[in-house]
Image: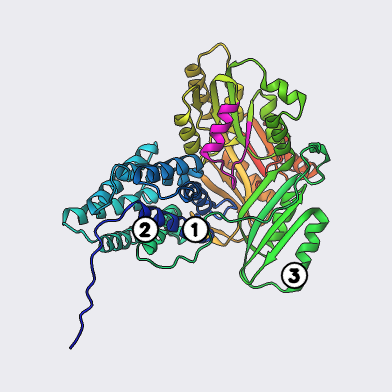
Amino acid sequence: MIKEEITVACTTIDAGMVARMFLAGARNLEAKKDWINELNVFPVPDGDTGTNMTMTVLSAAREVAALDQPDMKELARAIASGSLRGARGNSGVILSQLFRGFTRGIENHTQVTVPVFADAFAKAVETAYKAVMKPKEGTILTVARGGAEKAAELSQEGETDLEVFFREILDHMEYVLSQTPEILPVLAQAGVVDSGGQGLLEVLRGAFDAFLGKEVAYEPILPVKASLPEPSSMQEAADIRYGYCTEFIVMLEQPVSKEKEEALKVYLESIGDSIVVVADEEVIKVHVHTNDPGLAIQKGLSYGALSNMKIDNMRLEHQEKLFRTGEKKEAQLSVEMPKKDVGFIAVCAGEGLSRIFRELGVDEIIQGGQTMNPSTEDVLSAINRVNADTVFVLPNNKNIILAANQAKELTKDKTVVVVPTQTVPQGITAVITYVPDLSAVENENAMLEEIGHVKTGQITYAVRDTSVNGKEIRQGDYMGIDDTGIVAVSSHLERAVLETVSSMTDADTELLSIYYGSETTHENAQAMKEKIEDKYPHLDIELQDGGQPVYYYLISAE
């Protein structure tokens, strides 16, 4: 007699299962984040979509993991609140909005069925699209919408088996993701699919694995990092010998020998301390305290492509810690200053740029920018620290604007004005434009008009071989990027700078401001200025030490 295997359809799940699915999705995304980072279209050292999405979902996962047998409403609140405050970068903010809408669809149910899931998917997409001023197709939004449409179709057809429901949605979203290069030609040129859409798919794949009861062998949600020596709380910032905590991962083209690994350690010891170098067959993880992060980065590039780059200014962080804890009398006095009518917050990386903003009257500097997108919570905390009725926020990076706007929505006791500055030069122009006698609305309009006249160029390097807009790019090439995209590619830094300046200037250009980065000496920057002056004698050129990581030069033309 032949026994028939009977499969019982699963038609409902409770809050406990939703929580397990969410945590598994977070683990899967974290496990794939480096790969997702590599899907970045432009070969610049700030392809951080995977990192931003992971930090966003882990912020929510920590709140979920802390719950003890939550009901659906508690679970929904933890997912929405955690992801909202932890959101980083455009991809992270959009992901947080997807979670926010989804949880609105499930929070009032004790059991979740196919119709409830379909409704939640629809709310997720609706919320995410509303959060983006100009939704762009061929991105995570398109992939999410494809999943919502498939969910609605299956629900209307009367499907009740959740396994069938989830599997068909995943298959359809994978197809939609595969079509993103057809929608965005730049993806096709780079030979990749949309990184944000891939990240969303990885979250859902991990969740589906948990639903099926598979063992999820990813890293735990709350990884414990090895502690590294930090300056004493009583130590002056000036006493910190090496000011920049620099971390990155090298994606090896081929395994390195013990001799090469040791050579890397020796080199890092020559430029800093607190060295940690861990290598396996595929990657090298590097940590070093140094005064010149660019040297460490350049050395890392000689071993392979870089990812997960992170540079922290320890002296500035130390000063801010003293300010917050009141260990210095001056910090205490500044906290007790009377409330101002208007305050300013700016996002930037580099001691020089921070100093420039402070000299212009900016109250709070959020360390961040390319490779280091601050979270919604970071911006919200800065807003709370500024003792003013109206606070202007200058994101100075297009990938931070959504997080700033999200912080604005969470602020109830102050008027927050987010000026959508996409570059540091735009931020500087916005501050200079401010007139105390004008209202907040009048100042905002004036700033928007003025930043529209600022052209920005950035000089960095390529982290991999690729082709973008007909330009063949090799790993290690210097690249000039203006407001339209990559305009210069060369193995010579001077040529890349001059070609970028040429793309930014015209007969009406009068002023060129050059901010040189941490990996550029003043002497080299001065020589570069003189070469530009020789070619453009009619321009008024200003040279300033920006100290920014990753970018050799930031250039503005007005």
530 in relation to 141, above or below: above
Residue at 49% of width from left, 54% of height from top? 41
**Considering only order in the chain, which callout, 1 or 2, is on the residue closer to the N terminus?**
1
Image x and y of residue 208, in percent: 36, 61
**Numbered mark located on residue 177 in the image:** 2
Q: Which residue is mark 1?
A: 36
Name the residue type under label 2. Answer: Leu
In this rendering, the count of numbered labels is 3
Residue behind mark 3: 260
- The extreme top residue here reads 437
Q: Residue furthest bottom?
A: 1
The 10 Å Cα crowd at callout 3, few under 14, some 14 to 19, many 20 or more, is: few
Type of residue at label 3?
Lys
Q: Looking at the image, which is closer to me, 253 or 464?
A: 253
Q: Judge whether residue 507 can be spotted in this image.
A: no
In percent of width and height, residue 16 lies at 37, 54
Circles 2 and 3: CB atoms closer than 8 Å = no
